[in-house]
Amino acid sequence: MNQYELDTPCILVDYSKLLNNIYRYQQIADDAGVALRPHVKTHKTPQIAHLQVEAGAVGITVAKLGEAEVMADAGIRNIVIAYPIVGEAKLERLIRLAKRVELTVACDSYEVAAGISAAALNAGIVINMWIEIDPGYGRVGVQPGENLLRLAESLAPLQGIRVTGVLEFAGHSYDAETDEQRQEVAVREAKAAESAADVLRGCGFPVETVSGGSTPVSRFASMMEGVTEIRPGTYVFGDLTQVKAGALDIGQCALTVLATVISRPAPDRAVIDGGTKVFTMDGEDSVIGTGRGFVVGHPDITVSWFNEEHGVLTLPPSEQGLKVGDKLEIIPVHCCAVVNMLDELNIVQDGQVKDTWTIAARGKVK
Amino acid sequence: MNQYELDTPCILVDYSKLLNNIYRYQQIADDAGVALRPHVKTHKTPQIAHLQVEAGAVGITVAKLGEAEVMADAGIRNIVIAYPIVGEAKLERLIRLAKRVELTVACDSYEVAAGISAAALNAGIVINMWIEIDPGYGRVGVQPGENLLRLAESLAPLQGIRVTGVLEFAGHSYDAETDEQRQEVAVREAKAAESAADVLRGCGFPVETVSGGSTPVSRFASMMEGVTEIRPGTYVFGDLTQVKAGALDIGQCALTVLATVISRPAPDRAVIDGGTKVFTMDGEDSVIGTGRGFVVGHPDITVSWFNEEHGVLTLPPSEQGLKVGDKLEIIPVHCCAVVNMLDELNIVQDGQVKDTWTIAARGKVK
């Protein structure tokens, strides 16, 4: 079926571009001599996780336990949950999962570690744990230095856990405006992670993995001394945020939303059948000159604003021939957020739909 | 079960507040002598649609065909699709739906009307159509006046459709800052709709319904001369946008997100297990003094920012006793958007979970 015969709004994924992105970032990791552990929150789709592992990834990263369960069910064997697990219901699920895959969890506090320790001890197993440090982003993560040392000392007596790594996420790499600034962030976050690893080793923990790297800084993996692994996510598809962050070109973006013009209420205005329930309002800092999206083949159209089900396009005089029923492919601002809104990826090659993959880990917030 | 025993993040709906909101807006409509046709995009949940109809609503409004199908399956018999239906796949579904419920569709162009006309003729049925006019919001809708007259004349020869109403949505009522300004919008949109109805009647169409009104202006329904029906949606739950728009008080908000503190990385910072995948980034203009949410019982906490799975709270000195594992109830900026992110509503009375309702029309973007 031709992609334009699909009912809209829906997601298209260009298979060749997807593979190229997977291979390119695997090559970056290989060239830098570090492992690649992609964050699958971008695609939430087992088929793509398998493509990443087949290309050389050592395993995957997830945010939530529910994502890990879906990926484990689909046969992915090595999973890092880069998120603190809190509460009885989740600890029970964590234990069940740890019994069937090679699992590691992130942790940035004694409280989280103590909960996992008790659950693991009770189940008679040992769970691998990576300590999350804050490289300056200001989200989660223990502060390196004195705070980290105190945390490490408090963890030492806990049984049922094995501290084997350090993990950090430098979300502020998205604020960098030039490759030079991105390199600086990469070097700085690597230094923070490596020195945290030393602190933990000094406390007797067998720290082997130092894991870092978002999509924007992963290109500079070779400069991240001490880092043994990178965890980019968005590189598989790309979006306007990544284009702005210099991670790939607009032509390398593999994911688009196919939408239909449903109203032409004014000569310079067209309205499409996708709004925030497809595109979301994520990534407000990454809106580029064409607004909240980039219409493929129509770079002069502005994606001006969204309501839940409406997308309002502003048309220059050259684009006013657009008609009700016309279909447009639009690169979104933040692809991970878009993938979370719909149930399927339509896999496209040369404009033909070759497969439909269920976004099996969509909406797994628990 | 006590609501705090629920795994998080999840949605809580206070049953008493929900009922009060339903009754209060029904009373507003009754007092004004207009029909109430609630927009169910806010709750997407058949049980709540039935509560609205039982309280006196004449039927429901939906945005998308998929929402209409879910509601029809659940036994709702009178449905307006306030959205232009475009494309063969959707026209086929529209015909099937029109055969089993009392259905009306909105339309703002000859192209959309012609498609519906051809499909209806082919099926041997007649579909009710309301013409959507633009009362000055600048989204969809034909401009009143000359454009409307030309559209009406073009529709006259079409068979298979019956133009029985005028519909408008004054989204710009959300920009009003005082009740006086909201009243002005209400009066102005009513005038535009009533005069459009006259144009259509002059062309020979049996226009009976003049449908208008968002939640912020519905309180002024009695001033909307000529309007026969209002279509508020968000009033059932309320949220920070509606509080800002004067539609209800913070204490009347029926929907909250229950979230757990998963990290306390700094004395003035707590991180919860819900981010944009629960709260969304919708409603950026409606962020109030407490940021992107209001923490019930903790009015001095600021909901500062979200990533996909993280919500970062800023704590004043008086709130720094918050611990990992603590659960918080948070009123979101835009409740309709939140409902679209999760699968269930936990119905709560006096802090006890009395039922769990599936958000059956969640994610129906087609």
Image: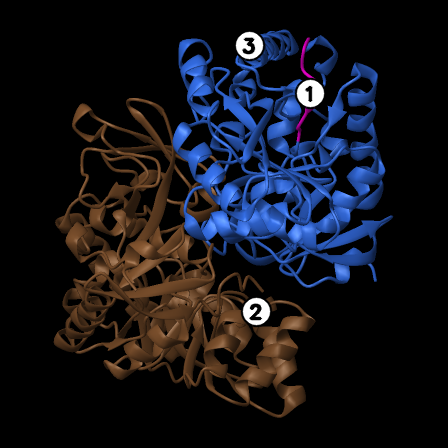
Chain colours: A brown, B blue
Residue A127, position as x, y percentages in the image: 52, 84
Is B216 left or right of A296, judged from the image as shown?
right
- The subunit carrying tag 1 is B
Circle 3 residue: B202
Distance in Å between CA atoms under marks 2 and 1: 44 Å
Please say if A322 is above or below B223: below
- The subunit carrying tag 2 is A
Mark 3, residues whose alpha carbon is within 10 Å: few (<14), some, or many (≥20)? Answer: few
| Amino acid type indicated by mark 2 | Ile
Q: Residue at x 45, y 60 (%)?
A: A141
In the rendered structure, find residue B218 and report the number of the disc placed on it.
1
Q: Residue at x 18, y 73 (%)?
A: A23
| Amino acid type indicated by mark 1 | Ser
Q: Are marks 2 and 3 on the same chain?
A: no
Residue A365 visible? The answer is: yes
Magenta residues span: B225-232
Q: Residue at x 35, y 64 (%)?
A: A346
| Amino acid type indicated by mark 3 | Gly
Distance in Å between CA atoms under marks 1 and 3: 28 Å
In front: B113, or A27? B113
In front: B305, or A289? A289
In the rendered structure, find residue A85 and report the number of the disc placed on it.
2
Please say if A235 is above or below B97: below
Position of the N terminus of chain A, as image quadrant, is: bottom left
Residue A144, position as x, y percentages in the image: 39, 61
